[in-house]
Image (cartoon, rainbow, N blue to C red):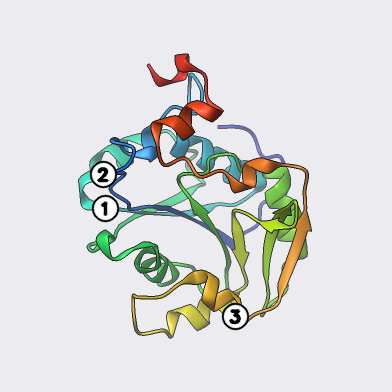
Amino acid sequence: MNEDSFQIDNDVSAIILSAGKSDRFGEPKAFLKFDQTKSFIQQLINEYYSTGIRHVIIITNKDLLERMQQQVQDVPKELTIEIIINPYPETGRFSSIKIAVDAINKGHNAFFQNIDNPFVTSSLLKQMMDKINDGMYVVPKFNNEKGHPVLLSNKIIQFIKNIKSIDGNLRDILSEFPAIEIAIDDANIHANINTLESYMKYFDHAVIH
């Protein structure tokens, strides 16, 4: 785990969505190797920690719980990690988002991060944190197309909390709120690693074994 690159921010949480069954890939994406020392989940935690974030919430499914707990055993003691089970992951991503918002500390803004895009950088996260305003959300943009992750202000988080249904779409919800867009020169914000072929597009053969 890297030393802090930025000032600690106790008003921002990071949500990592990793409850899918990975049927298309054949194995859980959270545990794929990012490099020779870190898995996807470990790489993401490292970047958020390096940004100064000290509260990470991982939404997973019951079959991955034990392995997920093993993955986060060596994080710094000042980093709080909550691993929460989505009991109905088959209903889709929004059910994980609904579960996550209930675990966010009161008053916090929060990043929402998909496990299938492990390329977020602490420098991008810091830029996004510097731009956030309540009632708005921050999103990176490359070639006029929005990418990941997204940073939601507390007002939007409270709005999602008040939605009763688990059948929703975050994109539709965000269309009701103003966006703060950050133009960056990094196509990886559009990455979506769901198959072996897409994994091989970004990673060397040696990383798989």
Residue 130: which quarter of the image?
bottom right
Q: Where does the image place residue 163, in percent across and percent down from the top left? A: 41, 84
Q: Is residue 11 visible?
A: no
Q: Judge whether 25 appears above or below 62 on screen.
A: above
Say which element carries label 2. helix
**Front-lying residue, 51 or 8:** 51
Classify 10 Å Cα crowding around label 1: few (below 14), some (14-19), many (20 and above).
many
Nearest the eye: 158 or 178: 178
> Quick one: 119 or 111, which is closer to the camera?
119
Q: Earlier in the sequence, mark 3 or mark 1?
A: 1
- x, y (%) of residue 149? 59, 54
Compute the Cα span from label 3 to label 1: 28 Å
- Please tell me which residue is depicted at 51% across the width and 81% down the height of the picture: 158
Question: Where is mark 1, residue-wise?
Answer: 61
Under mark 1, the amino acid is Asn
Residue annotated with mark 2: 64
Q: Which mark is residue 155?
A: 3
| Residue 63 seen from this side | yes
